[in-house]
Image: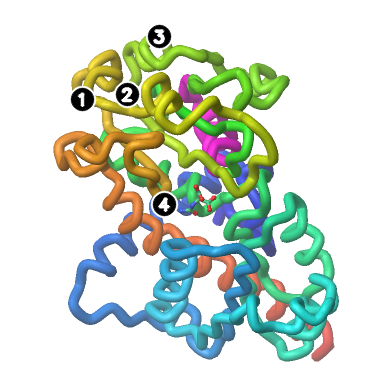
């Protein structure tokens, strides 16, 4: 096994062969999920707790289904109604849950680094379901699986990531993963939404869609993350769509067989034209959602194996 970690906190520390191992196992779960009866015992007897401090539709549903199909006992904490609202700190909440012996904690939090901090305080496996602008590793992995299935490989491709790069953990995790797998990454967006020093990641930066999309194999659109903006980053949504929104004209500069991706939730008419998003010949947005469940099953399956190996080793030490 190549993926030997206790937690999945980001793409940053994943080796290329660990990424390949996750994608290969996920591929098997894609077939499994298409069966009528989808029940495995990979996580049987294990407890999974989902803690989402930020809103989520697909990521939370995806982790919940993934855990259930693997046979775990899954609990969704309703964070809006939890003691966090009474002033309890993230660490105290984590320690409280830890005392109930969960095996997997799936955490989404608005602060970058919060999930790493939490992972240091608990005895179980922690999966980062998105922390602030930092990382969203399962999104990058599901994007990689979607690309690999559409293009037949996840190497030597030109991938354009477009829009609100500055506030996007999806962009950051994808940039790291695509770089590790030796792809060419282009970032396209207005200078106000482009983090400084981003070229150090070895990508090309554009502020013009036409130039940036030239010859791209993959066009990945990002949501304009208004909830993370505290000032005037764009003149108006109308103007933004005009310059950066993906429509047929802009897409015509990419390769003829380029695929269109979006992590969701989409703002139709802001970063993407509705007809492009719904075009089954170009858009793989629904496949991304399907791959999400399979990738999360693969990640949790591998983490559970690591957990069992770690605890098995400890148990035998105690026996001696
Ligand atoms: C993304 C996220 O939460 O970072 N969504 C997702 O997980 N599918 C992107 C976004 O919110 O725009």
Instruction: State whether residue 297 appears in this view.
Output: no
Instruction: State whether residue 215 appears in this view.
Output: yes
Closest to the camera, between mark 3 and mark 4, is 4
Q: Is residue 9 magenta?
A: no
Range shown magenta:
170-184
Q: Which residue is mark 3?
A: 211
**Mark 3 or mark 4, which has the lower sequence index?**
3
Count neighbours of disc 3 (C-alpha within 10 A) and say few if under 14, some if 14 to 19, many if 20 or more: few
Pointers 2 and 4 in contact (C-beta within 8 Å)? no
> Is 115 rendered above or below residue 252?
below
**Mark 2 or mark 4, which has the lower sequence index?**
2
- Residue 126 falls left or right of residue 86: left
Q: Which residue is mark 2?
A: 217
Q: CA distance from mark 3 to mark 1?
A: 17 Å
Location of residue 85 in the rendering, given as x and y in whole percent from the top left corner: 75, 78
**Mark 2 or mark 3, which has the lower sequence index?**
3
Pointers 2 and 1 in contact (C-beta within 8 Å)? yes
* Res. 265 mark: 4
Location of residue 214 in the rendering, given as x and y in whole percent from the top left corner: 34, 11
Q: Quadrant of residue 292?
A: bottom left
Q: CA distance from mark 3 to mark 4?
A: 26 Å
């Amino acid at each position: 096994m190549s993926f030997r970690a206790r937690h999945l906190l980001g793409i940053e520390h994943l080796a290329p062969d660990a990424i390949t191992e996750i994608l290969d196992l996920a591929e098997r779960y894609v077939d499994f999920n298409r069966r009528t009866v989808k029940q495995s015992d990979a996580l049987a007897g294990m407890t999974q707790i989902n803690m989402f401090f930020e809103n989520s539709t697909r990521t939370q549903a995806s982790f919940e289904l993934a855990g259930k199909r693997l046979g775990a006992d899954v609990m969704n904490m309703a964070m809006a109604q939890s003691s966090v609202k009474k002033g309890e700190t993230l660490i105290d909440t984590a320690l409280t849950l830890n005392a109930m012996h969960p095996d997997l904690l799936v955490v989404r939090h608005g602060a970058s680094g919060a999930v790493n901090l939490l992972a240091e305080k608990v005895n179980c496996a922690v999966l980062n379901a998105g922390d602030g602008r930092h990382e969203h590793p399962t999104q990058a992995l599901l994007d990689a699986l979607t690309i690999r299935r559409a293009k037949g490989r996840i190497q030597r491709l030109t991938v354009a990531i477009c829009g609100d790069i500055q506030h996007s953990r999806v962009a950051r995790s994808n940039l790291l993963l695509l770089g590790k797998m030796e792809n060419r990454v282009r970032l396209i967006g207005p200078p106000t939404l482009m983090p400084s020093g981003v070229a150090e990641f070895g990508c090309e930066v554009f502020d013009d869609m036409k130039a940036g999309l030239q010859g791209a194999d993959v066009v990945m659109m990002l949501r304009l993350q208004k909830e993370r903006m505290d000032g005037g980053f764009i003149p108006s949504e109308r103007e933004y769509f005009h310059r950066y929104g993906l429509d047929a004209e802009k897409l015509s500069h990419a390769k003829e067989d380029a695929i269109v991706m979006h992590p969701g939730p989409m703002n139709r008419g802001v970063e993407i034209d509705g007809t492009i998003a719904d075009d089954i010949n170009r858009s793989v947005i629904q496949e991304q959602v399907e791959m999400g469940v399979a990738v999360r099953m693969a990640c949790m399956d591998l983490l559970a194996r690591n957990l069992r190996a770690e605890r098995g080793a400890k148990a035998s030490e105690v026996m001696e």
